Amino acid sequence: MRLADGPAEHQYLTSEDVVLECELSRPDAAAKWYKDGEKLEENERISIGKEGTLRSLRILDARTTDSGEYLCDVQDDSVVFRVGVE
């Protein structure tokens, strides 16, 4: 697995959409997303995408409370993203 766009530091302004992506080695691998250790579930602001080997997390209308450490977890590998919203 590798990051789609280099270092995992991401800065956003409030009301922007947060988009995090990780690319997997296998298109059939299942990915789970976590924020500060809590598993994320889809809702009206959070969508989890899957397209080929790419997995994405989209958070609509970012708030300062969305700042934190996000993890894309795939069985024996994971990628960490640090997100700041101001």
Image (spheres, rainbow, N blue to C red):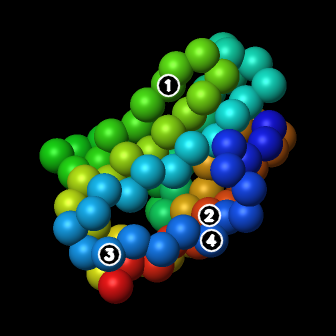
Question: Upstream in the sequence, badge 3 or badge 1?
Answer: 3
Badge 1 density bin: few <14, some 14–19, many ≥20, Cα 10 Å = some
The reply to whether callout 4 and callout 2 are in contact (CB within 8 Å) is no
Q: Which residue is mark 4?
A: 9
Question: Upstream in the sequence, badge 3 or badge 2?
Answer: 3
Q: Which residue does the image show at 25% across and 75% down from the upper left?
A: 14
Q: How many marks?
A: 4
**The residue under label 4 is which amino acid type?**
Glu
Residue 71 visible? The answer is: yes
25 up-or-down from 8: above or below: above
Q: Nearer the viewer, residue 51 or 37?
A: 51
Q: Which residue does the image show at 45% across and 45% down from the upper left?
A: 57
Question: What percent of the width, then of the height, locates residue 7?
Answer: 73, 64
Question: What percent of the width, then of the height, locates residue 53?
Answer: 66, 22
86 up-or-down from 70: above or below: below
Q: Which residue does the image show at 57% across and 44% down from the upper left?
A: 21
Q: Which residue is mark 2?
A: 81
In-image side of 20 versus 31 (left or right):
left
Which element is circle 4 on?
strand
Which element is circle 1 on?
strand
**The residue under label 2 is which amino acid type?**
Phe
Q: Which residue is mark 3?
A: 13
